[in-house]
Image (spheres, rainbow, N blue to C red):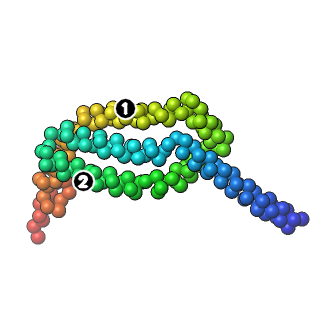
Amino acid sequence: MRKVYMIVLVMAFALALPVRAQEKDARRALAEELLELMNVQEAIEESFEAVKQMQASQLKSMGISEEATDRAQLMQGQIMDLLAKELSWDKLKDDYIGIYAGTFTEEELKGLIDFYKSPVGQKFISKNPELMKKTMAITQKQMADIMPKIQQITMEGMMDEVEAPSGVPSGTPAEAPKAE
C-alpha cells in the first residue's frame, strides 16, 4: 500500500511539473508583452541620456575650471557609454521579464496589460518621459544644493589623508615608537 501511495504521489508531482512550466511560460510571455507596452527599453535609454545631461549641468555649476570640467565631462561620458552598453535592454530584458513574471500573477499581468492598452494607460505611457524629466530636474536642483556639502566632505577627507602619518589610517592617532 505504501508503494502505491508513493507511486501516486510521484505521478502527481510529475504531471504537475509541465503545468507549472506552462504557467511560468505564460507569465513570462505576458510579462514581456507588458514591458513592451510600457516602453521600458526606451525609458532605460532615455534615463541614461537624462543622467548624462544632469551630470553635465552639475559639472558646470560646480565652479571648477573649464579644462577640469571638460576632462570630467569626457570621463563621465565614457562611464555613461559603458553603463549604457553593459546595462542595455538586450542584456537586461530576460531579467526584467523574470522579475515581472515572478512578481505578478497571470491575472495581474493581464490586468496591467489591459490598463496599458487603455486610453488612460496609453496617456500614462506617453507622459512618462515628461514625468521623468521633471523628477530629474527636482533631483538635479537638490543635488546642486547638496554639492557644496559633498565637496566639503571630500576636501576634508583628502586633507585628513594628506595630514595622516604614513601607514596610519586617517583618524587613528600615531603611536610613539617604543624604547627597547
At x 38%, y 52%, the residue is 84
* Identity, as a three-letter code, of the amino acid under mark 2: Met
| Viewer-side residue, 34 vs 3 | 34
User: Where does label 2 land, which residue?
Assistant: 75
Label 2 crowding class (10 Å Cα cut-off): few <14, some 14-19, many 20+? few
x then y, percent, for residue 123: 51, 31
Q: Is 99 on the left-hand or right-hand side of 155? A: right
- Locate residue 151: give its quadrant: top left
Quadrant in which the C terminus appears: bottom left
> Circles 2 and 1: CB distance less than 8 Å?
no
x then y, percent, for residue 141: 28, 32
- Above or below 116: residue 18: below
* Identity, as a three-letter code, of the amino acid under mark 1: Lys
x then y, percent, for residue 53: 29, 42
At x 28%, y 37%, the residue is 143
Q: Is 158 on the left-hand or right-hand side of 4? A: left
Q: Which numbered disc, 2 or 1, marks the residue that appears first in the sequence?
A: 2
Q: Is residue 150 visible from the viewing direction of this image?
A: no
x then y, percent, for residue 171: 19, 51
Quadrant in which the N terminus appears: bottom right
Q: Is 169 on the left-hand or right-hand side of 24? A: left
- Locate residue 65: give its quadrant: top left
| Viewer-side residue, 4 vs 109 | 109
User: Where does label 1 land, which residue?
Assistant: 134
